[in-house]
Image (spheres, helix red, strand yellow):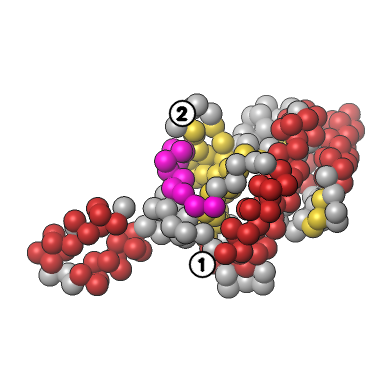
C-alpha cells in the first residue's frame, strides 16, 4: 500500500538513499507475481467486461493475487510466463497459476490484446467444462484471471502427471492406451468446437495428465494461446 511505502522513506534517507531512488527501488521490488493492486490495462478490462456480460463469471481486472492464493512451488517457466502451484487461502484447494509478464508480451505482436483473447477463449471453453462436468470435456478447467500492475494471472486446474509427449517418448503408450487417448483428444476438440473455439495447436505437448498415475481419464487439453473464436 502507498501508506506503507511512504512510511519507509525516512529510513531510506537515513541510509543515504534519495526519496526518488527509494520509490523506484520499491516499485521494482513490487514487480513480482505477488505485487500490489493497480488499475488494469484498457484492452484487458474491455475483454473482461465483455466476457462477464456474456458468461456472468467472476473475472477480476485488478487485485492482489496473494490475497487469495499462496504460492508454493514453481512448476515451469517460459519466455513470457511462470507457472506456479498455488493454494486457495480459504478452501485450501490446489491450482496452477500462470503468471504472464505484461512487459514481455507488450514487445510482441498482439501483446496484451492477444493474451486477453486467449483468456476470453479459455474462459468460454474451460468454464463451460465446469458447468457440464470437467471429467467429460477433456479440457483444463479455467477458474479466473487477475491482473495487477506487472502480471496477468490465470488460475486453472493443476496437472500432476506430466504431458502426453513425455508419456509417448517413454514408450508407455500401447495400442489400447493410444485408443483411449485419441477418444479424449477427439472429445476435447469437439468440446472446443461446441463452444465456437478452434484451438489451432493440438499436439502431445498440449495434453497433460491431471493425476500423477497418468490415467487417461485425467488427460486435459491445455494452452489456448493460438485459439480463435468462430462464433
Residue 195 location, quadrant: top right
Q: Which residues are magenta?
A: 61-71
The secondary element bearing badge 2 is classed as loop
- What residue sits right under mark 1 in the picture? 103
Q: Residue at x 69, y 48 (%)?
A: 53
Farthest residue to the front: give it: 53
Give the class, few, some or many, for how many residues have Cα within 10 Å of label 1's Cα (few <14, many ≥20): some
User: Is disc 2 surrounded by few (<14), some (14 to 19) or many (20+) residues within 10 Å?
Assistant: few
Residue at the spot 19% in from the left edge and 57% down from the top edge = 8
Residue pictured at 24% horizontal, 72% vertical: 20
The quadrant in which the C terminus is found is bottom right
Compared to 36, does 135 lie above or below? above
| SS at badge 1 | helix
Q: Which residue is mark 2?
A: 90
User: Left or right: where does residue 216 sit relative to residue 15?
Assistant: right
Quadrant hosting residue 17: bottom left
In the displayed structure image, the side of residue 45 where residue 65 appears, left or right: left
- Residue 1 visible in the current orientation: yes
Q: Is residue 50 magenta?
A: no
Q: Position of residue 133 (x, y in %)?
A: 76, 28
Viewer-closest of 220 and 1:
1
Amino acid at each position: 500500500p502507498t501508506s506503507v511505502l511512504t512510511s519507509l522513506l525516512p529510513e531510506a534517507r537515513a541510509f543515504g538513499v534519495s526519496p526518488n531512488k527509494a520509490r523506484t527501488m520499491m516499485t521494482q521490488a513490487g514487480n513480482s507475481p505477488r505485487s500490489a493492486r493497480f488499475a488494469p490495462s484498457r484492452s484487458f478490462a474491455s475483454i473482461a467486461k465483455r466476457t462477464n456480460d456474456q458468461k456472468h463469471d467472476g473475472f477480476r481486472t485488478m487485485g492482489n493475487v496473494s490475497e487469495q492464493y499462496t504460492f508454493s512451488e514453481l512448476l515451469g517457466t517460459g519466455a513470457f510466463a511462470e507457472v506456479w502451484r498455488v493454494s486457495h487461502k480459504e478452501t485450501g484447494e490446489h491450482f496452477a497459476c500462470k503468471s504472464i509478464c505484461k512487459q514481455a508480451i507488450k514487445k510482441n505482436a498482439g501483446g496484451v490484446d492477444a493474451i486477453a483473447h486467449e483468456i476470453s477463449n479459455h474462459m468460454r471453453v474451460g468454464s463451460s467444462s465446469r458447468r457440464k462436468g470437467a471429467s467429460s470435456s477433456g479440457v483444463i478447467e479455467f477458474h479466473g484471471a487477475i491482473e495487477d500492475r506487472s502480471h496477468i494471472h490465470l488460475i486453472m486446474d493443476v496437472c500432476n502427471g506430466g504431458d502426453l509427449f513425455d508419456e509417448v517418448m517413454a514408450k508407455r503408450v500401447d495400442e489400447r492406451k493410444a485408443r483411449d487417448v485419441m477418444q479424449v483428444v477427439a472429445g476435447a476438440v469437439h468440446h472446443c468446437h461446441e463452444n465456437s473455439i478452434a484451438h489451432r495447436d493440438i499436439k502431445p505437448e498440449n495434453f497433460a495428465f491431471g493425476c500423477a498415475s497418468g490415467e487417461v481419464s485425467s488427460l486435459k487439453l491445455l494452452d489456448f494461446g493460438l485459439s480463435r473464436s468462430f462464433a
